[in-house]
């Protein structure tokens, strides 16, 4: 039993949705278009990497995995947001809320660790180029991805227990579009300092630890790049890393503000807007950033699209 009797059959009301029908339709259409772009962009990257043998390298394996994780990550919340936006009763059941938060936090945490793995991959490629193929073997790449998923879902499981083992007798209205940790934890009664510390430490594990690993990798990369005498080689190294750094800045900036702060600073309206940035904005911008700044991905995408058009007789 995760809850006392008062929360056993509890439904949560999602209060962030507009009440006017025309605003609900606009919200539905806006999110639908962004979600369609997320699915299209990430699927194109996955297909391009899978279809082109010369992209079967660790860097593109991690990029493809990142796209898969982000498709699943958005699928954990966006379809529910779309369905709920058009429903008269904007409720989510207790069990659905638990499941949604579990997958959302688990995949989001895995996303953060994948970005750290990608930084490590760039470190090996730039700082140890002669040993790159010996270090970044296929077996190691699969193990790193598996470890990121395992750690992500362990963090999520701990957060689920910390949030949902307390009763919710004090209220059932979530000031959000979906079940995220800060708005749901605001509803729990009998909350102790231990719970708040546990939630904060989970955020440290999922956000700060991979961010430190990223910073360490890029510190070594920066030292190595400064030692390169060739301007072309230096420019190529910077170009390779800049796309990843742009994604890191967006992802960690939003997540740090959302999860690494005291619960007393919870601001519903601000958090609702911010959550849309890392739920929709990051998965949308990732394929754009990586495809626009990567010649190999752009060339592969053009070939895949041209091939599909020719098959259909266009």
Image (tube, helix red, strand yellow):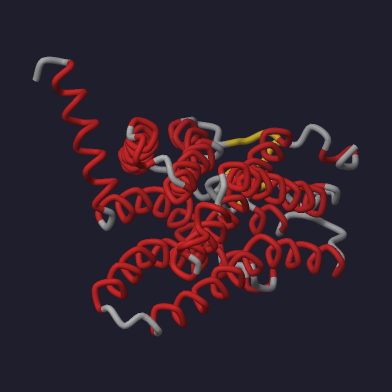
Q: Position of residue 147 (x, y in %)?
A: 68, 48
Query: Which quadrant would residue 129 be assigned to in this image?
Result: bottom left
Residue 216: x and y in percent read: 57, 75
Q: Position of residue 127 (x, y in %)?
A: 48, 70
| x, y percent for residue 48 | 32, 36
Relative to 65, say whether 121 is above or below.
Answer: below
307 sits left or right of 116 in the view: left
Above or below, 252 relative to 10: below
Q: Between residue 18 and residue 36, name the one nearer to us.
A: 36
Task: Give the residue furthest to the front.
Answer: 130
In this view, 141 is above or below 124: above
- How many numbered marks, from 0 up? 0
* Quadrant holding the N terminus: top right
Residue shown at the point (35%, 67%) measured from the top left: 242
If the image is split into quadrants, where does the C terminus sit?
top left
Depth order, front residue of 69/181: 69
Q: Residue at x 72, y 56 (%)?
A: 185
- Residue at left 54%, top 71%? 217
Side of 240 where 13 appears, left or right: right
What residue lies at 64% left-to-right and 56% top-to-bottom? 183
For residue 312, say whether it is visible.
yes
Q: Residue furthest left?
A: 314
Can residue 22 be seen here? The reply is no
In front here: 245 or 226? 226
User: Which quarter of the figure has residue 116?
Assistant: bottom right
């Amino acid at each position: 039993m995760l809850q006392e009797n008062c929360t056993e059959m509890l439904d949560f009301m999602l209060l962030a949705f507009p009440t006017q029908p025309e605003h609900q339709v606009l919200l539905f259409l806006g999110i639908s278009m962004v979600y369609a772009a997320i699915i299209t962009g990430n699927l194109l990257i996955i297909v391009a990497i899978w279809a082109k043998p010369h992209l079967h390298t660790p860097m593109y394996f991690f990029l493809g995995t990142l796209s898969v994780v982000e498709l699943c990550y958005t699928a954990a919340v966006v379809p529910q947001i779309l369905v709920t936006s058009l429903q008269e009763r904007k409720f989510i059941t207790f069990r659905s809320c638990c499941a949604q938060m579990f997958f959302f936090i688990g995949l989001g945490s895995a996303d953060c660790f994948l970005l750290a793995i990608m930084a490590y991959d760039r470190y090996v490629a730039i700082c140890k180029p002669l040993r790159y193929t010996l270090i970044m073997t296929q077996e190691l790449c699969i193990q790193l991805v598996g470890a990121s998923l395992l750690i992500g879902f362990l963090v999520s499981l701990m957060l689920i227990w910390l949030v949902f083992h307390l009763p919710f007798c004090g209220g059932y209205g979530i000031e959000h579009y979906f079940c995220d940790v800060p708005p749901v934890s605001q509803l729990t009664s009998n909350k102790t300092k231990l719970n708040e510390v546990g939630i904060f430490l989970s955020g440290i594990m999922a956000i700060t630890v991979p961010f430190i690993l990223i910073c360490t990798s890029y510190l070594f990369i920066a030292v190595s790049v400064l030692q390169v005498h060739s301007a072309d080689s230096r420019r190529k190294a910077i170009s390779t890393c800049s796309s990843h750094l742009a994604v890191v800045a967006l992802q960690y900036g939003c997540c740090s503000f959302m999860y690494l702060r005291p619960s007393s600073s919870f601001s519903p309206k601000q958090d609702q807007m911010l959550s849309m940035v890392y739920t929709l904005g990051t998965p949308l911008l990732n394929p754009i950033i990586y495809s626009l700044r990567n010649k190999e991905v752009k060339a592969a995408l053009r070939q895949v699209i041209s091939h599909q058009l020719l098959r259909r007789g266009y």
